[in-house]
Amino acid sequence: DAKTTQPNSMESNEEEPVHLPCNHSTISGTDYIHWYRQLPSQGPEYVIHGLTSNVNNRMASLAIAEDRKSSTLILHRATLRDAAVYYCILRDGPYQAGTALIFGKGTTLSVSS
Amino acid sequence: EPEVTQTPSHQVTQMGQEVILRCVPISNHLYFYWYRQILGQKVEFLVSFYNNEISEKSEIFDDQFSVERPDGSNFTLKIRSTKLEDSAMYFCASSGDRPGSYTFGSGTRLTVV
């Protein structure tokens, strides 16, 4: 899997938007960008994924740079429950079902009230 | 929403003892995984399993570890002779054929004393 770089930590206030960056300058044309998060004392959970176009779902938005060398996970209105470690992971596609997700250190997001 | 279920949530064992961690993956998923997370460290891949055999494993997954799908619903991780350094949170995960279907359980906290 291609390498990603994320800031170690970020802080946000409740009700404000949060932009979590991820650099992946060695991304290949078939790598999908996945975001997972891990709430305290829980297993990782899927957030969103994309290939080239920006994506939205009920949890977040994913903005992908035109050259695909970076992406940004956007939480539109942070809540206390969004405090977690956020992981940006690349996986080769077309989607290789069954291949393992490899986690880095991720970004620890703190949310203050 | 379908869940991956892990039991027990916490297990304490003496060094040298065998332990079996149990998981019930999502029923229509075909790929199964075990990960571990030592306290304060990142989530580490151990093994993936498909069609009743190991498809990938990491360096961590040595001869002390084994996996099995004994019936149509359970997926187990066995550690034959536990060491103190096996103390960690163990996560089971399963996935289907589409991106975003990777689902983790809440984990089993294994404490070796």
Image (tube, coloured by chain):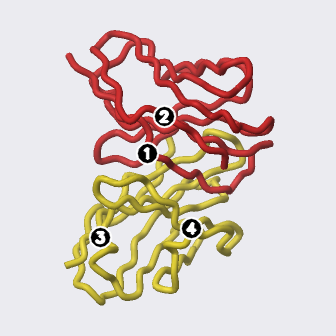
Of circles 1 and 3, the one toward us is: 1
Q: Residues within 10 Å of mark 2 (few under 14, many from 20)?
A: some
Q: Earlier in the sequence, mark 2 or mark 1?
A: 2
Point out the residue furthest to the front here. Answer: A25
List the residue tagged with mark 4. Answer: B47
List the residue tagged with mark 3. Answer: B87
Of circles 4 and 2, the one toward us is: 2
The alpha-carbon separation of the residues under discs 2 and 1 comes to: 8 Å
List the residue tagged with mark 2. Answer: A6
Of circles 4 and 1, the one toward us is: 1
Do the residues at discs 4 and 2 belong to one chain?
A: no
Do the residues at discs 4 and 3 belong to one chain?
A: yes
Q: Label for residue A105? A: 1
Q: Determine whether label 2 and label 1 are within 8 Å by CB.
A: yes
Amino acid bearing label 3? Ser
- Vertical side of B28 occupied by A39: above or below: above
Disc 4 sits on a residue from what chain? B
Amino acid bearing label 2? Gln
Q: Which chain is yellow?
A: B
User: Could you say whether the residue bearing mark 4 is in a helix, strand or loop?
Assistant: strand
Amino acid bearing label 1? Lys
Q: Residue at x 51, y 81 (%)?
A: B62
- Vertical side of B93 occupied by B110: above or below: below
Q: Can you tell which quarter of the image residue B91 is in?
A: bottom left
